[in-house]
Image (tube, grey):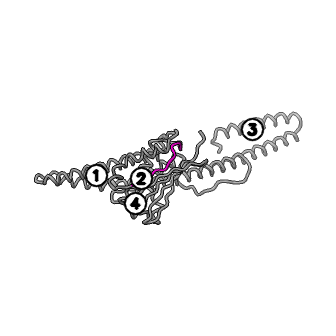
């Protein structure tokens, strides 16, 4: 404590003042000199004791901060005593709680990142292994022309699947990182639905499915046209894949003072009850998922919609079809 220059200057100042007071009292009487001397000693002693106590409290805080630095967030330095040190302790405690929460979040993000990398590796491994095998077979000199065409076609299909997977993962990563800037413009819902269906006309025609649209031309929402269309494409794609040949997909729109709703219902095989809480989780594949499914389409749709002041819910019964209800809540421009 006494090695601190501030304390030394403080002590020196008090001593000088005391000596001057004692010298001045000597001109009056011995009693006054003795009184001033005693008072000066008491004041200097009390000041030193107070400073020592403050140093002890500061030393405790230093030890507390060292423990926080080492990763121990369990200590509580708060007290109910008035004063600057108490305010400092309470503020440090608040920062400690914040750091503890951030640590938990970072740990959770780390686990999610590890799981995501593991899932991505697994998803990439299957098409890559298949392509390597077909590449080896294509290099065989005496391979029949029909087999060569078949392997080439399969190789292209795997490449397209790989391209879609990488593209989807990049889009999801941008949304998760908050680097995607969603536009906030009026969108005609009917035009949005038509745009989403354009990408699925061929599989719908192949499966001879019927698409019924009931949507007023005047209904609009606020959002990003292309990203919202991407979300609808993934939902409709799920419906087309799980609806049998000759099935029906119904799209309807409703508008009220609180939100605009887009309902997409199919007559497909439905979703198992135990799968419903998880279908919007990344890489989750339900019991009725196709072999080609990677479990990313609905997760992307959910992130896009919820990032634009929207919500999505699903109702389904096994063997009776599935209904997706998308709500875009009204915004004040």
Q: What residue does disc 3 label?
A: 15
Residue 293 lies in quadrant: bottom left
CA neighbours of label 4 inside 10 A, class few (<14), some (14 to 19), many (20+): some
State whether residue 239 is above or below residue 8.
below
- Judging depth in this view, the residue of 110 and 4 nearest the camera is 110
| Label 3 secondary element | helix
Magenta-highlighted residues: 210-221
Identify the residue shown where x is 24% and y is 53%.
154
Residue 114 coordinates in the image, percent (x, y): 41, 54
Task: Please give the label number shown on residue 285.
Answer: 4
Residue at disc 1, secondary structure: helix
What's the CA distance linking mark 3 and mark 1? 88 Å
Q: Residues within 10 Å of mark 1 (few under 14, many from 20)?
A: some
Q: State the residue at coordinates (78%, 44%).
A: 43
Residue 208 sits in which quadrant?
A: bottom left
- Residue 21 within the magenta-colored segment of the rendering: no
Inter-mark Cα distance, 1 to 4: 19 Å
Q: Which mark is residue 211?
A: 2
Earlier-in-chain disc, 2 versus 4: 2
């Amino acid at each position: 404590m006494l090695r601190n220059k501030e304390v030394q200057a403080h002590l020196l100042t008090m001593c000088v003042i005391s000596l001057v007071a004692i010298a001045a009292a000597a001109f009056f009487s011995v009693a006054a000199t003795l009184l001033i001397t005693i008072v000066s000693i008491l004041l200097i002693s009390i000041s030193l004791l107070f400073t020592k106590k403050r140093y002890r409290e500061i030393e405790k805080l230093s030890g507390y901060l060292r423990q926080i630095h080492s990763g121990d967030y369990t200590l509580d330095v708060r007290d109910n005593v008035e004063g600057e040190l108490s305010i400092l302790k309470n503020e440090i405690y608040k920062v400690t709680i914040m750091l503890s929460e951030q640590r938990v979040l970072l740990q959770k993000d780390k686990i999610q990142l590890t799981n995501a990398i593991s899932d991505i590796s697994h998803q990439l491994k299957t098409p890559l292994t298949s392509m390597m095998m077909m590449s080896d077979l294509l290099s065989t000199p005496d391979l029949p022309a029909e087999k060569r065409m078949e392997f080439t076609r399969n190789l292209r299909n795997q490449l397209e699947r790989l391209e879609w997977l990488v593209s989807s993962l990049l889009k999801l990563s941008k949304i998760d990182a908050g680097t995607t800037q969603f536009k906030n413009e009026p969108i005609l819902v009917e035009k949005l639905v038509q745009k989403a269906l354009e990408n699925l006309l061929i599989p719908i025609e192949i499966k001879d499915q019927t698409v019924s649209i009931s949507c007023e031309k005047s209904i609009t929402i606020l959002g990003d046209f292309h990203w919202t269309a991407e979300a609808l494409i993934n939902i409709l794609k799920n419906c087309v894949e799980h609806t049998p040949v000759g099935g029906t997909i119904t799209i309807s729109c409703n508008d009220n003072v609180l939100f605009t709703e887009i309902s997409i219902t199919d007559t497909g095989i439905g979703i198992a009850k135990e799968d419903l809480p998880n279908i919007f989780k990344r890489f989750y594949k339900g019991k009725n998922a196709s072999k080609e499914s990677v479990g990313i389409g609905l997760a992307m749709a959910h992130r896009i919609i919820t990032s634009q002041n929207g919500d999505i819910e699903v109702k389904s019964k096994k063997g009776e079809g599935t209904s997706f209800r998308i709500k875009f809540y009204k915004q004040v421009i």
